[in-house]
Amino acid sequence: MRKIRILSIDGGGIRGILPGVIIQRLENILQEVGEDPNIRISDMFDFFAGTSTGGILTLTYLMPDSNGRPKFTAEQAVNLYLDRGDEIFDASLLQKIKSLNGISDEKYDASELEEALHDNFGDTRFHELLKPCIISSYDIRKGKPHFFKQHKAENDIFNFKVKDIARATSAAPTYFETARIKNGIGTPFPLIDGGMFANNPALVAYSEARNMKFSFEDNPTAKHMMIVSIGTGSSSKTYEYKKAKDWGLAGWVKPIIDIMMSGSSQTVNYHLKQIFKTIEGEGKYDYHRLEPQIALAEPDMDDASIKNMTKLKEDALSYVADERVNQELYAIAAKLLKYNKESVDAKKINIENRND
């Protein structure tokens, strides 16, 4: 059976290094098994979903070059974090004092983030991306989620600059100023990080894919899908009762964001596992959740010191080196290549039929 192949990436700030390294390893395995060094991660999936840092990675994988191929390899995508992370999460002494370390104002000036996003995406618009995707954010004026849907972006109402979408999905409260971006007809949107409600966007992707028309499946359900969902180590941080029991507003500001994000990710994982368990046969194994463990690094999503970014990369490399994880990545690659070949073969058949 042909499958709609979905890649979903969680939010988590600088911890995006973790899924970035995992996807780099997956891309390398695909090239090895597929015997083609030109394979890119965007070639192997039909639909993408990302929140916050996962949204930035998603948009990076789907950026086109002048020949209509992916502009960045998976290695280049994660290197963007390693090269610019310490500049993006760098608060001056004045900013720390003014913001009371993120309590009375945003902790970081967004100018470094915006410069990095511009360098990465330029003025590319959403409709130009290589594959359909969904990126989450939250509209504070309307008081409801806002989903950027690339498959609707031919209409200027839903079309934005890619760098603006990246800015909106990563506008984490207390860390960065709320984003104010405009669509193709000039309507402004005040948006914050989608991690506030959908830090793990895999269920969003599943729901959206069920209502999309793919060339080979008009009414897809879970049995027609393969989902690869990658976390950012968001379940690793815990809090001691003795310390937390007397926290007030100031004490809970950062922990509550972490709890919301990790709780969202774990809940989505639980529900998708339940959904795929209802499928008979091998299809029940087409949901893959890869959640790396943070062992050496600090889990704070804004700890972008060179030392901590190095440790995040080491944690990710240790994770993919684990025999069980390595086997799962090879299994994922084999299925992606198999389903991709079936899709290509089916397209050839459709073309031949039309020619007849």
Image (spheres, rainbow, N blue to C red):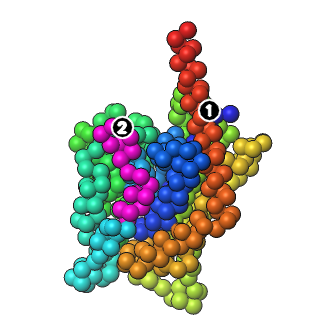
Q: Residue at x 66, y 51 (%)?
A: 331
Q: Nearer the viewer, residue 70 or 36?
A: 36
* Secondary structure category for the residue under label 2: loop
Q: From the viewer's perspective, is 28 left or right of 188?
A: right
Please, is residue 282 above or below residue 316 in the view? above
Identity of the residue furthest to the top in this view: 356
Q: How many marks?
A: 2
Q: Is residue 138 visible?
A: no
Image location of residue 279, percent across then percent down? 74, 43
Q: Is 80 inside the magenta-drawn segment?
A: yes
Q: CA distance from mark 2 to mark 1?
A: 23 Å
Image location of residue 236, percent across then percent down? 57, 74
Q: Nearer the viewer, residue 192 or 296?
A: 296
Image location of residue 82, percent across then percent down? 37, 68
Q: From the viewer's perspective, is 186 left or right of 348?
A: left
Mark 2, residues whose alpha carbon is within 10 Å: few (<14), some, or many (≥20)?
A: few
* Secondary structure category for the residue under label 1: helix
Q: Is residue 341 visible?
A: yes
Residue position marked by numbered label 2 in the rendering? 68
Which of the numbered marks, if any, corresponds to residue 178?
none
Q: Residue at x 42, y 61 (%)?
A: 78
Mark 1, residues whose alpha carbon is within 10 Å: few (<14), some, or many (≥20)?
A: some
Q: From the viewer's perspective, is 40 left or right of 64?
A: right
Quadrant of the rendering where the C terminus is positioned: top right
Q: Earlier in the sequence, mark 2 or mark 1?
A: 2
Q: Nearer the viewer, residue 93 or 341?
A: 341
Please, is residue 14 above or below residue 56 in the view? below
Residue position marked by numbered label 1 in the rendering? 342
Q: Residue at x 62, y 56 (%)?
A: 329
Identity of the residue furthest to the right in this view: 281
First to last magenta residue range: 64-81
Q: Amino acid at mark 1?
A: Glu
